[in-house]
Amino acid sequence: MGLRFRKTIKIAPGVKLNIGKESAGISIGGKFAGISFNSKSGARVRVSAPGTGLSYSTKIGSTSKNDKKKKNSDKKVSS
């Protein structure tokens, strides 16, 4: 089992700074909806329906380094 580190600092109501061993990010929003920006995984938006257990999260904006590598390797070189 690996060692994990995570620290969350509340900056303002609905705004948190999250610091981990390998990345840092900021979260804006409340319990049921919000947006997060992370130095490792990019930006995500999330929404949930209270009391139902249903939630949705999706990546937005630019792709991560791994996604870019995969896309570049999938491209066909035309001559």
Image: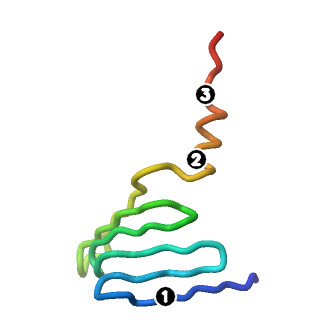
Residue at 62% over, 31% down: 74
The residue type indicated by label 2 comes to Asp
The residue type indicated by label 1 comes to Thr
Looking at the rendered structure, the secondary structure element under dot 1 is strand
Marks 3 and 2 in Cβ contact (< 8 Å): no
Placement of 42 over or under 34, stated as above or below: above
Q: Which mark is residue 67?
A: 2
Q: Nearer the viewer, residue 76 or 21?
A: 21
Dividing the picture into quarters, in which one does residue 15 lie?
bottom left
Q: Position of residue 64 (x, y in %)?
A: 56, 53
Looking at the rendered structure, the secondary structure element under dot 3 is loop
Residue at 49% over, 73% down: 25
Q: Residue furthest top?
A: 79
Q: To which residue does mark 1 refer? A: 8
Quarter holding the N terminus is: bottom right
Q: Residue furthest front?
A: 11
Left or right of 68 on screen, residue 25: left
Dividing the picture into quarters, in which one does residue 79 lie?
top right
